[in-house]
Image (spheres, rainbow, N blue to C red):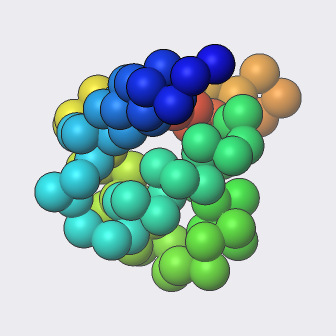
Amino acid sequence: MSTTEALAGEETSSDRWDPVREMPPSAKLVAKVLDYNEQLTQSQLAEETLLPPRTVRYALSRLEDADVIEARISFTDARKRLYTLAI
């Protein structure tokens, strides 16, 4: 792979983060943690990010409004939602 191809690949991969760039730091952190993990619940995100649950809820709502994440009901516990990165 040439240097030009590598740079083009970096530009393409960084473009997917455009919807997140202007968001609060908490939303960026939640998105990045979801990038490293396939799917997490809200409580797992709070544990991973060390953010208060209220801040995680706010970050998730901002990310959902921007269609950056997807949420679905957990099959093991219908009270919980599983979040995945959609970008």
Q: Quadrant of the C terminus?
A: top left
Residue 47 horizontal side relative to residue 16, left or right: right
- 64, above or below 44, in the image: above
- 25, above or below 16, in the image: below
Residue closest to the far left: 22
Residue 64 horizontal side relative to residue 19, left or right: right
Instruction: Give the camera-side residue of 4 and 22.
Output: 4
Residue drawn at the location 33% of the way across and 71% of the way down: 25
Residue 20 horizontal side relative to residue 82, left or right: left
- Can residue 17 be spotted in the picture? yes
Residue drawn at the location 39% of the way across and 50% of the way down: 60
- 58, above or below 35, in the image: below
Instruction: Give the camera-side residue of 83 and 81.
Output: 83
Position of residue 37 measured from the top left corner of the image (x, y, whole percent)? 72, 43
- Can residue 80 be spotted in the picture? no
How many marks on residues? 0
Position of residue 7 measured from the top left corner of the image (x, y, whole percent)? 43, 33
> Which quadrant of the view contains residue 57?
bottom left
Instruction: Give the camera-side residue of 67 and 8.
Output: 8
Residue drawn at the location 48% of the way across and 20% of the way down: 5
- 58, above or below 16, in the image: below
Q: Quadrant of the N terminus?
A: top right
